[in-house]
Image (cartoon, grey):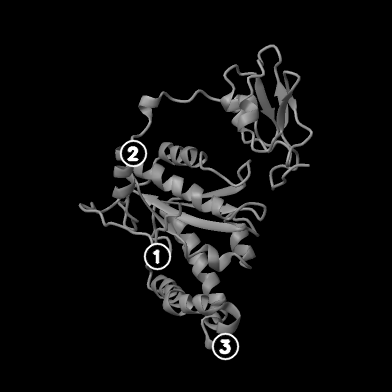
Amino acid sequence: MAIINSRTREKGKIIIDYDKCTSCGLCVAVCSDKSLEITDGRLHESANAVFGCFACGHCMAVCPYDAIKIEGREMSGKDLFTLPPSDRYASYDSLYALLSSRRSIRHFKDKNVEQEKIDKILEAASTAPMGIPPSDVQVVVLKGKETIRAFSEDFVGVLKKNKFIYSLLGSKIMKPFIGKEISELFNSFLNGLISSYISNMDQGENAVLYDTPLAISFQTTMYADPADAYIVATYAMIAAESLGLGSCMIGGVHPFIKKGAKKFKKKYGILERYSGGIIVIFGYPKYKYRRGVRRTFKDVKNLE
């Protein structure tokens, strides 16, 4: 048995080097699938695995003797690397300084983002945790103002084509079917957002992606947890902040193209069907912010 997604339908192959293995049991302890066990003092693959190896890599990463490898599910022993020394880790204070200094930036300098920085953003984002490996997040990179303007204009075209449907969703007759909260959200925000997108574009102003120099769309296949796309996008934003770039999540595109919009999605390499999607815009901030704004949760409950 194996957990399938769009990239693989097989379980990982566990390879044990018995010349190195001491049966210390660390790999057994960290395997949440119970794919490994020790019997009669010898490590071997278990017949009682929950799903079969899904290639999380924990066993390879914890083994002090480099005695175990996983092959398959987009993983191999070549993917292992030595962790950086602890003195290179960010302290809580330095991490919090970075996070609390970040703001959602929508105004950028007329300057392209270098490919080296794009590569670093994606490299950092690829380290994000996911529901089940391998990652089933698809990435579409839109570079340059012309490409991003074309994407935005085509998206507004989709909105115009479906404007009647969106107005219907915000109507009173749909409230019993879509629920109070969705109805209120449409009336208080989404209807206004759609009107803003259309009216601004008609006047030559891009209120969708703001003619930023770089936008990256993250979407997950139907096999994946939709949260995976949002977590990866968050990692990308943090990486961008560390590189001196501003960023902003744009959540007002994917909800309107999730169903339909086949021509639009095909043109821009977006999955025809996906479970979750988000766009992040990036660039060099045009304005410098001098103060932060404290944020709070709705509530925090401590249970003991």
Instruction: Decide: is 236 above or below 298.
Output: above
Image spot of residue 48 (x, y percent): 77, 36
- Residue 277 appears in view: yes
| Left or right placement of residue 105 versus residue 122 in this view | left
Q: Secondary structure at mark 3?
A: helix
Image spot of residue 19 (x, y percent): 69, 11
Mark 2 burial class by Cα count in 10 Å: few <14, some 14-19, many 20+:
few
* Marks 3/2: CA–CA distance: 51 Å
Mark 1 burial class by Cα count in 10 Å: few <14, some 14-19, many 20+:
many
* Marks 1/2: CA–CA distance: 38 Å
The disc labelled 1 sits on which kind of residue? Asn
Residue 173 badge: 3
137 or 36: nearer the viewer: 36
255 or 198: nearer the viewer: 255
145 or 273: nearer the viewer: 273
Image spot of residue 133 (x, y percent): 63, 41
* Marks 1/3: CA–CA distance: 32 Å
Q: Nearer the viewer, mark 1 or mark 3?
A: 3
Location of mark 1 (residue): 206
Instruction: Decide: is 150 above or below 57.
Output: below
- Residue 218 appears in view: no
Q: Residue furthest top?
A: 19
Pointer 1 or 2: first along the chain: 2
Pointer 3 or 2: first along the chain: 2
Residue 122 badge: none
Location of mark 2 (residue): 92
The disc labelled 2 sits on which kind of residue? Tyr
Image spot of residue 70 (x, y percent): 67, 28
Q: Secondary structure at mark 2?
A: helix
The disc labelled 3 sits on which kind of residue? Ile
Which residue is at 37% across, 27% downward?
Answer: 88
